[in-house]
Image (spheres, rainbow, N blue to C red):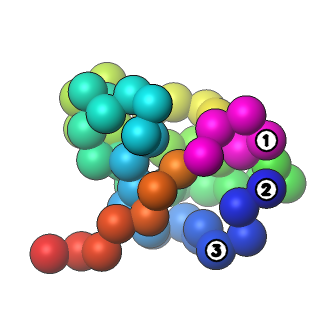
Amino acid sequence: MQYDLEPGNFVINPSEENWGIGQIQSIIKNIATVNFQNCGKKVLNLDNVVLKKIHNE
């Protein structure tokens, strides 16, 4: 599980870069809801997906 992520963080999914930049909406236990710019809302199991946090520019 990724402990450095929290709602409001901007992330990318390196295995699905075409999804674009996403903003974490919520994290409950190991389930994150992320709103991605190119594909909308995704519910991800953080045990199976490693998100890369990006800095706001």
* x, y percent for residue 50: 60, 46
Is residue 52 inside the magenta stretch?
no
Chief SS of the magenta region: loop
Is residue 45 among what the camera can see? no
Q: Residues within 10 Å of mark 2 (few under 14, many from 20)?
A: few
Q: In which quadrant will I find the C terminus?
A: bottom left
Q: Residue at x 79, y 56 (%)?
A: 1
What residue is disc 2 on? Answer: 1
Q: Residue at x 30, y 74 (%)?
A: 55
What amino acid type is highlighted by mark number 1? Asp
Please give the label number shown on residue 28: none
In this picture, residue 18 sits left or right of residue 34: left
In this picture, residue 3 sits left or right of residue 53: right
The answer to whether marks 1 and 2 mark residues whose Cβ atoms lie closer than 8 Å is yes
* x, y percent for residue 15: 45, 31
In terms of depth relative to the viewer, which is nearer, 39 or 47? 47
Inter-mark Cα distance, 1 to 2:
5 Å
What amino acid type is highlighted by mark number 3? Asp
Q: Which residues are magenta?
A: 46-50
How many labels, in total?
Answer: 3
What residue is disc 1 on? Answer: 47
